[in-house]
Image: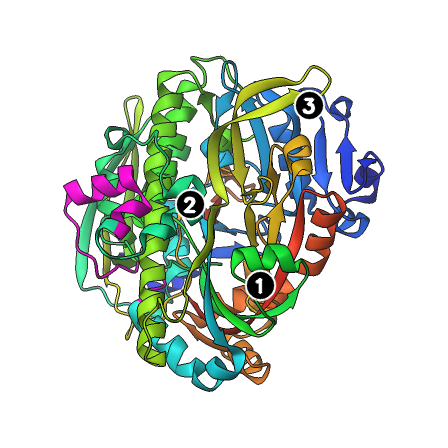
Amino acid sequence: MDAKLVRHFTEIERGIWELPKSFRKGMKVPLRVIATEKLLKEMDDGAVEQGINVASLPGIITASYMMPDAHWGYGFPIGGVAAFDIKDGIISPGGIGFDINCGMRLLTTNLTEKEVKPRIEQVVNDLFDVIPAGVGSSGSIRLNKKEFKEIMVKGAAWAVDAGLGWQEDLHQIEEEGRIVDANPESVSDRAIVRGINQLGTLGSGNHYLEVQKVEMIFDETAASEFGIMQVGQIGVMIHCGSRGFGHQIGTDYLNMFESVMKRYKIEVPDRQLACAPISSPEGKRYFSAMACAANNAFCNRQVIAHKVREVFSHVFDKSAEKLEMDLVYDVAHNIAKIEKHVTSNRKLVTKELMVHRKGATRAFPGQPVILGGSMETGSYLLTGTETAMQKTFGSTAHGSGRTMSRTKAKHQVRGDELRKKMKEHGIYVKTASYSGLAEEAGFAYKDINEVVTALSTADISQPVASFKPLGNIKG
Amino acid sequence: MQSAKLRKKFRFLPDIATADLAFEAFGKTYNELFENAGYAIESAMVELDTLKTREVKEINLKNDNLVNLLSSFLEELVFLKDSEQLLFNSAVCNVQKNGRLWVLTGKLGGEKINRNEHKLEVDVKAVTKHLFKIEKLPNKTFRCQVILDV
């Protein structure tokens, strides 16, 4: 961040830095950044500018937040959190992202590194064969329109009912894998056509499926509650979202909102922040379509998890139940949710709010939080806190956060070189695109340990365990 | 259809939008500008030289302004990638103002995605409106700037 801009920030509490609303005309609330001093100074100017823009949106409550992994996106910064009053606030597709309910899922196994490492190439190759990844990939499940609409309403439960999961999985998913406000009537035919063949696919970009080992355990009690029992234990992390279906819903409503803002006398500093009042017909319609995409994403990750269980079961010649391939948690990090929060500590006023989390994770007390790192450096499992409820509307970071553009990263390393280097470091990768792999090199990301330090310092989540990759598939 | 050498009239921008993919494209006319923006988005997804023109798709789009017409053209390319698994390596665009509306008619040539034959790059999720613009440069050529969500 530009040094002149940094000087306007004050550390109002440990690890929480505030840019006052007096900084720029039009800001309705301050901007608050959760960061160590190092991360604050390294934050993109573009991201901070976007955080300031969010602070000017109608009906925003308390502050515009940026998590320590925040970086320059479109509309909201990635790593942005903002809550809006249900009565006079707005809902914005740019505050959710086109990839509605992009999120993380973590499965355990009772296998150890010693057992998996010798067979990692077979595991990864088999996963790559059954989980389609990359540009325009389509899945093996053929659905008719009626079935696809059932997924929009039922979410992960559709897959469990179809035998692609365990009943107990549903209890380990945010909202039990189903947002109740979904209405397929709010979804365009284009979105259906675009997404109907993509169930069970990973996508590309930073989406991945990773076989990991537990590297360190920080909180043994929480770890054991989450099924993390020992260092060296193998887990599987899945990062993906609602695929073309969600992307099209985002596109459809962004276009619609841009044309209706005038009617609601809303002006925004960035076209990507196009929005509508939550209580307007358009706002309600978008929310119910967004819920369809969110449910589709929960179902997508459920189907992928089923494939993972099948592959492990085949390779290790034991049932997934015997391998204790339980779901630790599945959490969204691109979503808007209606939640009740205390908005004034002095008067203990509770309000119903539309909490936008774009590249940010819900972090309710005791809830598992999955922080997906770069595929070279590893990931974290954390737990939500009471402080997060008080300070960030129960929200925390979602990953390590990029520091370098994809175009720059590609110029610094070739995908095949990176794959070779990763193999030397004990990480076996299968990718649908070598250039896509190069874009995801570890050096393009912030230090995830510093991100966790920032979260822990501000006490909006606390680390439970860290993970190191052994194998990875990516699109 | 445009010749291969015209395809170079775009470039990806390294210093905009850390998480996404920004490009600029140029054209002496709106037709060329649209075609080159089309090549930019396709080449974000696939190495164009690995594609062959086996299918031709007609496009017909309308919008009340030129910026949104370009946006909807690029959105159409993203839509066709997922809905029909089609990627394109040739395009001819005809952009005209018809009364109050801007109209694009054209043809796209390409083929269905084949993982064994095509060198695939990154999946484009959407065309964002962040910093999206069309401008006329002093040398009278047109330039657009687009950020893709990938």
The amino acid beneath tag 2 is: Asp
Q: Which residues are magenta?
A: A131-160
Q: Is residue B70 visible?
A: no
Q: Earlier in the sequence, mark 2 or mark 1?
A: 2
Task: Say whether residue A200 is left or right of residue A32.
Answer: left
Please, what secondary structure does the residue beneath circle 1 have? Answer: loop
Q: How many marks?
A: 3
Name the residue: 59% across, 81% down. Answer: A425
Horizontal and vertical percent for residue A210? 47, 67
Crowding at mark 2 (Cα within 10 Å: few <14, some 14-19, many 20+): many
Task: Say whether residue A133 is left or right of residue A75.
Answer: left
Read off the residue under disc 1. Answer: A374
State which chain disc 2 sits on.
A
Q: Which of the numbered marks, if any, corresponds to residue A47?
A: none
Read off the residue under disc 2. Answer: A99
Position of A50 relative to A20 (above/below): below
Q: Which of the numbered marks, if any, corresponds to residue A29?
A: 3
Crowding at mark 3 (Cα within 10 Å: few <14, some 14-19, many 20+): many
Q: CA distance from mark 3 to mark 2?
A: 27 Å
Name the residue: 56% across, 41% down. Answer: B138
Q: Earlier in the sequence, mark 3 or mark 2?
A: 3
Q: Is residue B7 visible?
A: yes
Q: Nearer the viewer, residue A435 or A197?
A: A197
In which quadrant of the rendered view does residue B113 lie? bottom left
Instruction: Look at the image and tell me in which quarter the C terminus of chain A lies.
Output: bottom left
* A372 part of magenta stretch: no
The amino acid beneath tag 1 is: Ser
Task: Say whether residue A350 is left or right of residue A329.
Answer: right
